[in-house]
Image (cartoon, coloured by chain):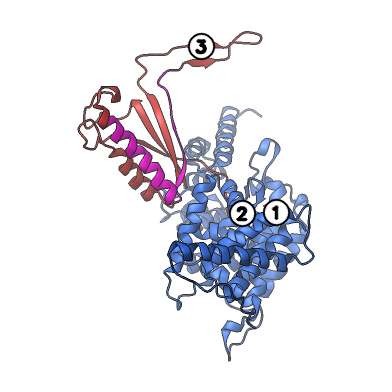
């Protein structure tokens, strides 16, 4: 079963621990935080549960179709958009409980003071292909 | 030599290496490497004796790997000798391989991967593509599974029920990349049925009168569902429910074979869940439409399935059959005691409510069912159902 672990720059429940953006941390704390993510991904590969991880720039824009023969319209970026996705991780695990366990582990990445940041992560199951036998 | 006959040799070649003294994990790795080499070399330079070629190349790989390992550990290991293959029958080895790869100590996804590699002869890359994970992840999953098996005491050979479960999972996954998992599951189930036919392991006094009934039941179940494959999806890949499938396009040969296998299995009088499921599939296969389907008998088979498995999903499916046999109110009544948090619970109640004429409730339930659907095709189908019922509501009263 595949699950998406979604990291947000903004949005989600109120943070449990308030901490400044990563660029204001001590360099060693930044390194420790990034290393934690790398180790986590490496461990997932070792357990045969890693599928993918990607980080997203906070920059970007909304785009839409604007009629035949016209260029697409862009809008934004919106400074106040309440939800902003920072990146994701995709895992392939045996159960929902295992997905929760891993999300909890990732959420414990060290913060500016070296202690867990208690970051809220969004956990979403993938939709799959339909099973063959249903009756 | 095309790919499937080549892959058919894999379990036997692993068996030869194990008989020559290699451990399962190393033998399996060596054969996988030989297989990848064969896929690269054979198209231009086919061997005269494919099996002997694979044994030679795999054994050489095994010896090289063992030497490297020995020198890494700084000690000598005598692996040069090639003891002749023993008199052990190869069929028994392959059956043991099925049991090992689907051993109950393995997580389901690992058992599936290992079975597809060591018994099915697929490459790690193909398995990874079929299950949409990176090759490195799949390789780790397989090597972890083998490490786990290495810790097994010898007196725990595994059990047939988990082998059947693994093949059922592979079949239910359907298509996956360039590998047809359903067809592969059928091939492996066929081989398993042949292997369980009077197994030597059964010992003296065992009255084997044919292959294992549940293995046969599972194969029948797969064939009966595979027969409908072409009709299960419509234009654009949309899901076509059983009631709307073009039954003239069902594969009658597969159905005939499935029914024949099922009858042989049932005659052994050792009913199990796969035989009961196959019996339900056979009753559907036998009918020209849902109206002509023997729903009363289908409900009876569901009763057997409830007795055999106690599964809540079976109770849910039984309610649909009861709805067909005795009317939608009976179907809704049959839902009493079924947990509402089951996948498809909302879809089933939506259907029964529509049959009962409560369109408002049916539309809302279809929409809810779409929200909680586990697959894209089901979600899209249920969304269309909700839209269809809402349209019926709008036009209700107009002639």
Residue B281, compared with residue A85, is above or below; it is below
Cα distance between the residues tagged 1 and 2: 10 Å
Query: Could you tell me which chain the residue with mark 1 belongs to?
Result: B
- Give the side of residue A87 with respect to residue B283, left or right: left
Residue at horizontal 66 percent and vertical 39 percent from the top: B237
Other residues around mark 1 within 10 Å, as few (<14) / some (14–19) / many (≥20): some
Vertical arrangement, residue B44 with respect to residue B283, above or below: above
Could you say which is closer to the camera, residue B363 or residue A43? A43
Question: Looking at the figure, which quarter contains the C terminus of chain B?
Answer: top right
Badge 1 and badge 2 in a common chain: yes
Q: Is residue B346 visible?
A: yes
Question: Tag 2's secondary structure?
Answer: loop
From the viewer's perspective, is the residue at label 1 or at label 2 nearer?
1
Pair 3/2: label in front: 2
Does residue B49 lie above or below A21 as drawn? Answer: below
Q: Secondary structure at mark 3?
A: strand
CA neighbours of label 2 inside 10 A, class few (<14), some (14 to 19), many (20+): many
In the rendering, which numbered label is found on residue B123?
2
Q: Give me the disc on residue A74.
A: 3
Q: Chain of mark 2?
A: B
Q: Which chain is red?
A: A
Residue in the foreground of this view, choosing between B394 and B282 = B282
Question: Residue at the top extreme?
Answer: A70
Name the residue beneath numbered marker 1.
B39
Is residue B90 toward the left or the right of residue A51 in the image? right
Task: Tell me the CA gap for discs 3 and 2.
Answer: 46 Å
Residue range (magenta)? A30-59
Q: Callout 3: residue from which chain?
A: A
> Residue B248 or B154: which is nearer the viewer?
B154
> Could you say which chain is coloured blue in the image?
B
């Amino acid at each position: 079963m595949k699950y998406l672990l979604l990291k947000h720059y903004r949005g989600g429940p109120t943070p449990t621990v308030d901490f400044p953006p990563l660029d204001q941390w001590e360099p060693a704390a930044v390194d420790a935080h990034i290393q934690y993510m790398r180790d986590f991904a490496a461990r997932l590969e070792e357990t045969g549960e890693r599928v993918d991880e990607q980080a997203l720039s906070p920059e970007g824009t909304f785009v839409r179709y604007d009629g035949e023969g016209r260029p697409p319209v862009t809008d934004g970026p919106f400074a106040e958009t309440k939800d902003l996705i920072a990146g994701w991780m995709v895992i392939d695990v045996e159960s929902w409980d295992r997905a929760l366990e891993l999300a909890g582990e990732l959420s414990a990445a060290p913060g500016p003071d070296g202690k867990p940041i208690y970051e809220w992560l969004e956990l979403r199951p993938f939709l799959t292909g339909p099973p063959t036998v249903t009756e | 030599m095309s790919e499937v006959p080549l892959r058919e040799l894999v379990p036997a070649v692993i068996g030869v290496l194990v008989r020559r003294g290699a451990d399962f994990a190393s033998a399996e790795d060596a054969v996988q490497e030989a297989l990848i080499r064969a896929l690269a070399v054979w198209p231009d330079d086919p061997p005269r004796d494919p099996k002997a070629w694979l044994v030679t190349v795999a054994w050489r790989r095994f010896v090289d790997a063992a030497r490297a390992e020995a020198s890494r550990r700084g000690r000598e290991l005598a692996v040069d000798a090639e003891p002749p293959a023993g008199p052990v029958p190869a069929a028994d080895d392959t059956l043991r391989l099925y049991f090992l790869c689907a051993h109950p100590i393995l997580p389901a996804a690992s058992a599936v991967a290992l079975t597809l590699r060591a018994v099915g002869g697929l490459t790690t890359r193909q398995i990874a593509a079929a299950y949409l994970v990176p090759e490195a992840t799949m390789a780790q999953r397989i090597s972890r599974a083998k490490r786990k098996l290495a810790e097994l005491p010898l007196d725990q050979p595994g059990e047939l029920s988990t082998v059947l479960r693994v093949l059922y999972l592979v079949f239910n996954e359907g298509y996956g990349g360039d590998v047809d998992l359903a067809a592969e599951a059928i091939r492996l189930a066929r081989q398993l049925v042949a292997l369980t036919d009077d197994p030597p392991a059964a010992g003296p006094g065992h009255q084997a009168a044919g292959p294992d009934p549940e293995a046969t039941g599972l194969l029948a179940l797969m064939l009966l569902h595979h027969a409908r494959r072409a009709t299960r999806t419509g234009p654009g890949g949309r899901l076509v429910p059983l009631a709307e499938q073009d039954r003239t396009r069902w594969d009658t040969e597969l159905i005939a074979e499935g029914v024949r296998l099922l009858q042989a299995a049932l005659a052994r009088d050792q009913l199990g869940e796969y035989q009961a499921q196959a019996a339900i599939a056979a009753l559907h296969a036998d009918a020209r439409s849902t109206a002509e389907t023997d729903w009363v008998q289908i409900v009876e088979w569901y009763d057997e399935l409830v007795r055999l498995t106690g599964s809540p999903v079976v109770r849910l499916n039984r309610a649909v059959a009861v709805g067909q046999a005795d009317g939608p109110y009976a179907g809704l009544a049959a839902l009493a005691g079924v947990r509402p948090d089951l996948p498809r619970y909302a879809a089933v109640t939506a259907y029964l409510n529509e049959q009962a004429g409560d369109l408002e409730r049916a539309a809302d339930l279809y929409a809810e069912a779409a929200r909680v659907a586990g697959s894209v095709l089901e979600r899209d189908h249920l969304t269309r159902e909700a839209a269809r019922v809402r349209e019926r509501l709008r036009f209700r009263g107009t002639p």
